[in-house]
Image (cartoon, grey):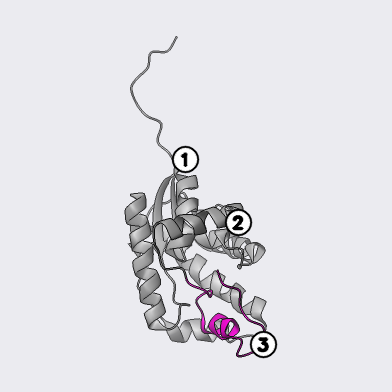
Amino acid sequence: MIPFSGEKKMKPNILIHVCCGPCAIIPVEQLQERFEVTGFWFNPNIHPWAEYEKRLHNAGYAFQRLGVPLVYDFSYNISQWFASALSSSDKKARCRACYDIRLSATAEYAALHGFSYFTTTMAQSLFQDFDSITAAGYKAEELYGSRFLPEDFRSYYREGKGRAMEWMMYRQNYCGCLFSEVERRGIGGKKFPKR
């Protein structure tokens, strides 16, 4: 029999891109069972600025309650984001460009700061394209070397929404970009559902 050394096996570390506080709660709790988790805030897609600030503060509140560190990248290069998003009039293509920008920044930070893995809270939303998120994650993995974890948290969406309500958190009713705000208001056609 090998004597117990008293050493704990270290969990691998993971950087989770945070789109908003409500979508982070359950994914972070789920990941903590297997990983040392750190959040990463980078969202140049969120418009207008007042909405960006609400979601930023909300994310900080969620991570404080969860007892998990949150790193902030306040880069808000609106010109770069619009240049990428406007490269196509197709909604799916715009979303893919947005996923690429955010997950590339996450993968780069993960690689530069020694994180073994990265993932995103966007994978909890029923309103996001999980396959496109996964494709963007693997593309970023190839660029930067930190491994992408394609974790699907969508089955926890309602639980996360309920917890956000218990915590009295602000819950947005559109993805974040100007295009989704226009959709939500029904200006350009169909209305975006309440989240």
The residue tagged 3 is: 189
Q: Secondary structure at mark 2?
A: helix
Residue at mark 1 to residue at mark 2: CA–CA distance: 18 Å
Could you tell me residue 119's position as x and y percent? 51, 56
Q: At x 60% / y 56%, what residue is drawn?
A: 154
Residue at the disc numbered 1: 33
* Picture layout, residue 151 above or below residue 90: above
| Residue 78 highlighted magenta (yes or no) | no
Residue type at mark 3 is Gly
Q: Vertically, is 114 above or below 194?
A: above
User: Gap in Å between the C-alphas at discs 1 and 3?
Assistant: 43 Å
Q: Nearer the viewer, mark 1 or mark 2?
A: 2
Q: Earlier in the sequence, mark 3 or mark 2?
A: 2
**Callout 2 crowding tier (Cα within 10 Å): few <14, some 14–19, many ≥20:** many
| Secondary structure under the numbered disc 1 in the rendered image | loop
Mark linked to residue 154: 2
What is the CA distance from the residue labelled 3 to the residue labelled 2? 26 Å
Q: Nearer the viewer, mark 1 or mark 3?
A: 3
Total numbered labels placed on residues in the image: 3
Q: Magenta segment range? A: 172-195
